[in-house]
Amino acid sequence: MDEQELEEQVLDMLESICDDEAVREERDIDLFDAGLLDSMAAIEVLVEIEERFGVDIAPTAVEREEMNTVNRIIHQIAIRL
């Protein structure tokens, strides 16, 4: 999977989970501070990452600050692929 395909799949996933297309334009906005993610949605993101990409990221394996923006989520997946 190339970087562009990864980004597009993550954007589709987050747009669906957050129910807001703002994730596509504001890729460095803190998704929690913006009210786009809460703790339940964050778990949904981790489950979806495992299902889509085969990447297991335990909630205790990363700090919230490491996965609080679109770009950081993409980075965390990319380094595990």
Image (cartoon, grey):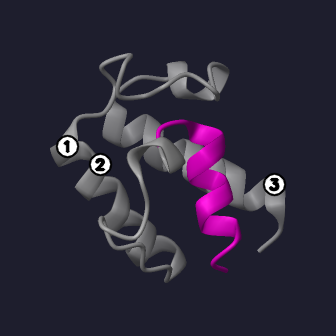
Q: Amino acid at mark 1?
A: Ser
Asked if the residue under mark 2 is in contact with the one under mark 3, i.e. CB atoms within 8 Å, the reply is no
Residue drawn at 48 percent across, 25 percent down: 30
- Residue identified by numbered label 3: 4
| The one of 26 and 72 positioned closer to us in this rendering | 72
Asked if the residue under mark 1 is in contact with the one under mark 2, i.e. CB atoms within 8 Å, the reply is yes
- Spatial CA distance of label 1 from label 3 is 27 Å
From the top left corner, tell me how far across and down residue 44 is, in percent.
26, 56
- Which quadrant of the structure image shows residue 1? bottom right
Q: Amino acid at mark 3?
A: Gln
Q: Amino acid at mark 2?
A: Ala
Is 11 inside the magenta-drawn segment?
no
Q: Residues within 10 Å of mark 2 (few under 14, many from 20)?
A: many
Which segment did they paint magenta?
Answer: 68-81
* In front: label 3 or label 2: 2
From the top left corner, tell me how far across and down residue 39 is, in percent.
20, 43
